[in-house]
Image (cartoon, grey):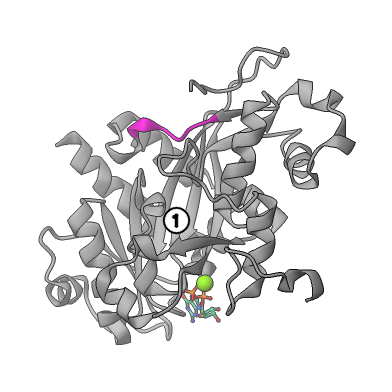
């Protein structure tokens, strides 16, 4: 425990492990109206390869490493880094500000999907 | 802030796929994770999310006094549908009381599967209410644990007292083909809604 016991405003007595993820995002969780949804896709920009990694938070470079080859959703990054999704959203916000990633929001159409979109999903599942 | 797809800056010409999602709801132990695993191209992954008191209803607050933050776990899988679409399946969090308040999970879902153990039909009432209220299309999967058909689709529709009949599919979600049938029933039903 040691370090983790340090009292702070976001320390949760019952589940002390909350401390670490909160600390990683500087105590921030994703703000209201965050630009990131659970399935927002994230991919590292080529420019991120030339980033001076020693100067960056390890979690930020871990996200860049994970998304170098292909886009991953916020939840996939969260699961692989063992961080809550809301913390990953904050970190990705930082990366977006630095132009280190490109993101794609989920379809606007999804809550009222067109017949065409639904047929594409149907065909994709049939092919499984 | 505009963030549409891979930006061209830096030279990547690839278009990013669009992500879609379907929810898999149902009581504890009803087979949600099993269903996700049967169709996902990756083994189901699990992640956690914070739920703060602010998003919890008054009734629930009374039951978790002096707690500012709780975590809900959810699992999910991925299906690449075609070059432009990737579908995520989300198992709803274990604490059934909480996930209803979790807008990010429900927002923009194509639809939902409510998995049901026919011996514990009442476990699915809350999920059914939720999707009916939000007008999210759903299908009911009856997980026939003992290989017996313990009820008919008509009986399930009657017991759930559905506003509009939902597809009811008998399934064994350990089998990919069976899980696919449930998903396809949901999507065909959503298509009927879309046609109007
Ligand atoms: N016989 C049978 N067992 C199942 C079926 N689906 C799930 N199970 C078993 O039921 C248990 C709970 O399933 P799980 O997917 O973890 O449930 P969850 O809590 O809804 O995610 C596991 O041991 C599964 O192997 C099914 O269709 N038939
Ligand atoms: Mg499960």
Percent from the top left, x then y, of residue B162? 13, 65
Q: Is residue A111 magenta?
A: no
Left-right relation of A89 to B52: right
- The residue at 39%/80% (across/down) is B65
Location of mark 1 (residue)? B180
Q: Quadrant of the N terminus of chain A?
A: bottom right
Q: Is residue A98 visible?
A: yes
Which range is magenta?
A104-109
Left-right relation of B120 to A2: left
- The residue at 19%/42% (across/down) is B193
**Number of disc labels:** 1
Q: Nearer the viewer, residue A38 or B90?
A: A38
Q: Is residue A66 above or below residue B181?
A: above
Left-right relation of A78 to B74: right
Percent from the top left, x then y, of residue A16? 65, 74
Mark 1 secondary-structure assignment: helix
Q: Is residue B26 visible?
A: no
């Amino acid at each position: 425990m040691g370090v983790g016991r340090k009292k702070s405003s976001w320390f949760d007595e019952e589940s002390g492990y909350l401390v670490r993820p909160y600390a990683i995002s500087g105590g921030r969780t994703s703000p209201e109206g965050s630009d990131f949804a659970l399935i927002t896709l994230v991919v590292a920009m080529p420019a991120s390869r030339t980033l001076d990694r020693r100067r960056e938070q390890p979690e930020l470079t871990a996200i860049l490493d994970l998304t170098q080859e292909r886009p991953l959703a916020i939840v996939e990054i969260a699961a692989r880094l063992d961080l809550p999704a809301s913390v990953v959203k904050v970190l990705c916000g930082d990366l977006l500000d630095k132009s280190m990633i490109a993101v794609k929001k989920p379809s606007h159409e999804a809550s009222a999907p067109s017949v065409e979109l639904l047929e594409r999903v149907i065909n994709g599942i049939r092919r499984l | 802030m505009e963030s549409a797809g891979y930006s061209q800056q830096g030279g990547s010409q690839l278009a990013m796929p669009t992500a879609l999602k379907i929810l898999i709801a149902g009581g504890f132990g009803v087979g949600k994770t099993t269903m996700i695993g049967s169709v996902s191209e990756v083994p189901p992954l699990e992640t956690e999310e914070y739920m703060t008191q602010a998003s919890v209803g008054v009734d629930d607050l009374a039951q978790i006094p002096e707690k500012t933050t709780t975590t809900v776990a959810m699992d999910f899988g991925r299906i690449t549908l075609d070059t432009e679409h990737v579908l995520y399946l989300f198992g709803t969090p274990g604490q059934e009381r909480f996930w209803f308040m979790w807008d990010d999970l429900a927002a923009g879902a194509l639809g939902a599967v409510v998995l049901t153990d026919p011996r514990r039909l009442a476990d699915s009432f809350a999920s059914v209410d939720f999707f009916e209220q939000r007008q999210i299309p759903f299908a009911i999967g009856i997980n026939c644990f003992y290989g017996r058909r313990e009820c008919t689709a008509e009986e399930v529709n009657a017991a759930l007292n559905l506003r509009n009949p939902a597809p009811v599919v008998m399934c064994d979600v350990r089998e990919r083909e069976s899980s696919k049938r449930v998903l396809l029933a949901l999507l065909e039903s959503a298509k009927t809604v879309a046609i109007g």
